C-alpha cells in the first residue's frame, strides 16, 4: 500500500455522519471524545469497536443509553486486545466458511493509557505478536482519570496526580513516561503512529492508514484531559498543539520499521510553554523544567527532530 | 453407526470440539489439560477441520478471546485447569452475565499452594458462583457426549450461557478408555454445523455489549441472569433426551445407583463415582442398604431431582474434593444441608472431604466413610472427616 496516501486532505473529505454520537457524558473539552469522533469518521460504519474499562466506557454506555452507532463491546480492563483477537479471528473464520459476507470490517480497540501501558500490556503484547489484523488506539490522558486522576505508567515525570502527590518529601510522579509506541514497534508490527486532536487530519489519516494496514497497527493519541490536567477546557486543543510544537509529544509514524516525522516542527518552542498552563505541573521550579527540557531534547534528537 | 475406539480422555474432549465444528479455539497450556489443546492443534494443522487456533498468552486472554469470538457469532472452545481457571475468574462472570455461548473443558486440578498439578475440585468450586452451567463427566464417553451436547445447550436461545464440562485431572485426562465415536452425519442430526447468533457484533445492526450498569438496573440484570441459569435446567434435560434419541446414550441431571431400597447413600461428582460404585457393591454384599447418586449437573443445582432421589434415605454421605476454608465443610455438603433444611427433610447429611491435591480415593476409603456413618461417628458438631488414603 501507499503509506503516504492522504485519505483526508481537508475536513470536507471526512464524512458528515458520526458513529460516536452526541449525548455522551464526557467532561467539557475532553480530548478523548474528539479523537474518538474523528477516528470513527475516518474508519466509517463497517467497524467493530472493543473498549476496555476506562473513561470512554463510562461516558459512552450508561445502560440503557449508548453513544455508539457502530457495534461496541466492553468486557474488562486488561483484556481489550484479547477480546479483539477473538473478534478478528471469529470474523476471519466465519468469512472463510462462507457464513459472513466477505468484506473488510475494521476491528478497532479504543483504550485508555491504564488499559494499555499498565494492566492491558500483556494482552496487547500477545495480540501484537500473534499478528491479528486490527487497529489498537491508546487514548492517553496520562493517568487513571475516570477513577479520579491516579498515576499510570503513562504519567509524565514530576506530574501531580492523586497518587503521586506533591508533598514535602516527594514532588509528583517519580518516573519518566513509559515509551509505549517504542514497545509496540519492538513487536515489529507494520504500523505505529502518534497523534493528537490538534492535528485532526493527521490523526484521521493515521487511523485510516492503520486500519488499512494488513496486520496489527497501533496509534498512540495524546488525549488532553482538562479535568485531570487542571486546565481550562477551552485550552484542550491548544495544549495538544503545544505538546507537539514543544517536542513534548512529537508526531510520527513507523511503517515497517521506518520512522517518519509527520508534523515537522522547524523551531521547537520551550517545553515550559506546554507545562505552565497546566495545574498538574504548577509546582515545577525552573530547575525541574530544565530537567524535563533536557529529556525532551534527547528524545527529539533520537527521532531526528531538530 | 459410529465406531468403537480406544481414546485418551483428553483426546475425547478434542474430538468433541472437532465434531462440533468449532470456529475458534483459544489455547493456553496448563497441566493436566494440555493434551486437549495439543490434540486440537494437531487436528487443525492437519486440516482435519477448519478453525482459527489462537495461541493466547494466558488463560485470562483465552476466555477473553472466546468472548470476542462468541460476540461475532462464532462457535468457540477453550480448555483449562486449576490456576488457569482461577486466572479466568473475573472474566467467567462476564462471559455468563453478558450471555455469551462458550464451551470450556475443565480438567479439574488443585489450586495452589502448594503448587500441585493433580486432580481435585478446588478450581471449579472456587468458580462456583460465576453463573456458568457446570457439568461433571466421569469418563471418556461422558466427556465426549457432554461436551458435544454442551454446544447445543449453550447456544439455545432460551439459555445463551457458557457451559463448563468438568472432569478429573489425570484420573480422567491421562487414561485411555473405550468410547463410541459417532459418525459425522449422526452428529449433524443432533448439532447443526454452525451457530446462529441472534445477538452479535454486526455493523449492519449495531449493538452495545457490556454497558455500565447503574444501581437502578444492575439488580434486575443479575436477577434475569439467575432466572436464565435456573431455567436452563429444562433445556439441558431436553437436549440430553434428544441426545439419547440420536445416539442411544441417555443422560440426566443425576444418575442413581442401587438406590431403590437404599438407606445410606453417597453423593458425589466426577471420576470417583466409578470407585464408589464398587464400594456400594461391596457394602451391599456385606448386607448394607447402600446406594450412590452421581451428580452430573452441579449448576444449576437440580434441587427437585435431588429431593426426589433422596426421599427414602436416612443418611446422605457427601464426598467433596474441596474444602470451603473456614466455612462448614465442602460445597456439596453445604448445598445439600441447606436444601434439606429448607424443605424440612429429616435426613442426616454426613460430610466427607477426600481426594484433595490428587490423593487417591479408594474403594476402602468409601467403605470407611460408610462405616463411620453406621457406627454413629458422624454428628452435626463433628461433621467433617478428612479421609487420608495412602497414596
Image (cartoon, rainbow, N blue to C red):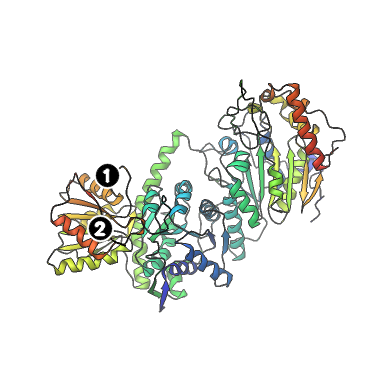
For marks 2 and 1, give the one nearer the viewer: 1
Left or right of residue A105, residue B246 in this image: left
Residue under the image location 20 percent in, 68 percent down = B281
**SS for callout 2:** strand
Q: Identify whether A43 is placed above or below B253.
A: above
Q: Identify whether A101 is placed above or below B93.
A: below
Along the line of sight, the residue nearer the viewer: B372 or A267: B372
Q: Residue under label 2, please give it.
A: B267
Image spot of residue B295 (x, y percent) = 29, 59
Marks counted in the figure total: 2
Quadrant position of residue A110: top right
Image spot of residue A178 (x, y percent) = 67, 39
Position of the C terminus of chain A by quadrant: top right
Q: Residue under label 1, please give it.
A: B328
Q: Residues within 10 Å of mark 1 (few under 14, many from 20)?
A: few
Residue under the image location 21 percent in, 52 percent down = B350
Q: Which of marks 2 and 1 is nearer the N terminus?
A: 2
Position of the N terminus of chain A by quadrant: bottom right
Quadrant position of residue B140: bottom left
Q: Residues within 10 Å of mark 2 (few under 14, many from 20)?
A: many
Left or right of residue A157, residue B363 in this image: left
Q: Name, please, the residue furthest toward the front.
A: B390
Residue under the image location 46 percent in, 62 percent down = B33
Amino acid at each position: 500500500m501507499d503509506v503516504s496516501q492522504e485519505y483526508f486532505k481537508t475536513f470536507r473529505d471526512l464524512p458528515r455522519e458520526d458513529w460516536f454520537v452526541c449525548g455522551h457524558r464526557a467532561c467539557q473539552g475532553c480530548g478523548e471524545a474528539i479523537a474518538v469522533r474523528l477516528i470513527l469518521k475516518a474508519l466509517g460504519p463497517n467497524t467493530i469497536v472493543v473498549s476496555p474499562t476506562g473513561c470512554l466506557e463510562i461516558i459512552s454506555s450508561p445502560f440503557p443509553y449508548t453513544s455508539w452507532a457502530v457495534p461496541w463491546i466492553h468486557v474488562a480492563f486488561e483484556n481489550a486486545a484479547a477480546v479483539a483477537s477473538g473478534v478478528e479471528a471469529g470474523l476471519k473464520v466465519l468469512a472463510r466458511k462462507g457464513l459472513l459476507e466477505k468484506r473488510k470490517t475494521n476491528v478497532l480497540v479504543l483504550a485508555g493509557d491504564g488499559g494499555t501501558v499498565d494492566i492491558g500490556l500483556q494482552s496487547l503484547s500477545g495480540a501484537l505478536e500473534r499478528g491479528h489484523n486490527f487497529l489498537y488506539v491508546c487514548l492517553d490522558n496520562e493517568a487513571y482519570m475516570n477513577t479520579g486522576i491516579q498515576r499510570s505508567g503513562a504519567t509524565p515525570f514530576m506530574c501531580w496526580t492523586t497518587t503521586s502527590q506533591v508533598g514535602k518529601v516527594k514532588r509528583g510522579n517519580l518516573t519518566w513516561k513509559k515509551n509505549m509506541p517504542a514497545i509496540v514497534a519492538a513487536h515489529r508490527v507494520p504500523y505505529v503512529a502518534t497523534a493528537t486532536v490538534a492535528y485532526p487530519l493527521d490523526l484521521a489519516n493515521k487511523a485510516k492508514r492503520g486500519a488499512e494496514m494488513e496486520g496489527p497497527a497501533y496509534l498512540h493519541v495524546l488525549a488532553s484531559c482538562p479535568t485531570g490536567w487542571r486546565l481550562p477546557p477551552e485550552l484542550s486543543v491548544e495544549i495538544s498543539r503545544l505538546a507537539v510544537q514543544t517536542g513534548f509529544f512529537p508526531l510520527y509514524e513507523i511503517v515497517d520499521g521506518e520512522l517518519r516525522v509527520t508534523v515537522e516542527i522547524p523551531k521547537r518552542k520551550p517545553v515550559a510553554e506546554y507545562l505552565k498552563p497546566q495545574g498538574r505541573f504548577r509546582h515545577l521550579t525552573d530547575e525541574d523544567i530544565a530537567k524535563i527540557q533536557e529529556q525532551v531534547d534527547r528524545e527529539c534528537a533520537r527521532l531526528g527532530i531538530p | 453407526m459410529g465406531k468403537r475406539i480406544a481414546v485418551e480422555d483428553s483426546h475425547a474432549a478434542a474430538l468433541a470440539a472437532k465434531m462440533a465444528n468449532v470456529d475458534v479455539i483459544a489455547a493456553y497450556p496448563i497441566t493436566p489439560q494440555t493434551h486437549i489443546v495439543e490434540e486440537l492443534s494437531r487436528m487443525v494443522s492437519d486440516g482435519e477441520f477448519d478453525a482459527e487456533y489462537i495461541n493466547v498468552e494466558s488463560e485470562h486472554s483465552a476466555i477473553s478471546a472466546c468472548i470476542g469470538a462468541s460476540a461475532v457469532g462464532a462457535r468457540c472452545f477453550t480448555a483449562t485447569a486449576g490456576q488457569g481457571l482461577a486466572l479466568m475468574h473475573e472474566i467467567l462472570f462476564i462471559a455468563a452475565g453478558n450471555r455469551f455461548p462458550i464451551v470450556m473443558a475443565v480438567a479439574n486440578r488443585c489450586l495452589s499452594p502448594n503448587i500441585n498439578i493433580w486432580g481435585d475440585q478446588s478450581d471449579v468450586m472456587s468458580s462456583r458462583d460465576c453463573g456458568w452451567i457446570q457439568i461433571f463427566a466421569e469418563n471418556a464417553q461422558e466427556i465426549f457426549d457432554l461436551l458435544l451436547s454442551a454446544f447445543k445447550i449453550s447456544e439455545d436461545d432460551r439459555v445463551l450461557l457458557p457451559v463448563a464440562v468438568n472432569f478429573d485431572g489425570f484420573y480422567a485426562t491421562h487414561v485411555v478408555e473405550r468410547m463410541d465415536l459417532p459418525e459425522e452425519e449422526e452428529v449433524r442430526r443432533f448439532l447443526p454445523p454452525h451457530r446462529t447468533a441472534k445477538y452479535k457484533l454486526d455493523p449492519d445492526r449495531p449493538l452495545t455489549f457490556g454497558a455500565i450498569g447503574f444501581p437502578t438496573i444492575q439488580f434486575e440484570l443479575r436477577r434475569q441472569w439467575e432466572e436464565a441459569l435456573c431455567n436452563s435446567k429444562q433445556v439441558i434435560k431436553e437436549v440430553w433426551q434428544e441426545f439419547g434419541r440420536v445416539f442411544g446414550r441417555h443422560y440426566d441431571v443425576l444418575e442413581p445407583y442401587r438406590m431403590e431400597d437404599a438407606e445410606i447413600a453417597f453423593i458425589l461428582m466426577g471420576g470417583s463415582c466409578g470407585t464408589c460404585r464398587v464400594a456400594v457393591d461391596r457394602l451391599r454384599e456385606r448386607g448394607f442398604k447402600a446406594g450412590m447418586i452421581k451428580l452430573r449437573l452441579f449448576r444449576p443445582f437440580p434441587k427437585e431431582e435431588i429431593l426426589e432421589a433422596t426421599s427414602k434415605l436416612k443418611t446422605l454421605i457427601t464426598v467433596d474434593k474441596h474444602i470451603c476454608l473456614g466455612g462448614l465443610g465442602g460445597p456439596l455438603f453445604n448445598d445439600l444441608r441447606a436444601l434439606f433444611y429448607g424443605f424440612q427433610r429429616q435426613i442426616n447429611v454426613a460430610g466427607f472431604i477426600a481426594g484433595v491435591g490428587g490423593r487417591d480415593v479408594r474403594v476402602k476409603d468409601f467403605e470407611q466413610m460408610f462405616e463411620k456413618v453406621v457406627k454413629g461417628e458422624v454428628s452435626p458438631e463433628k461433621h467433617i472427616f478428612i479421609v487420608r488414603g495412602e497414596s
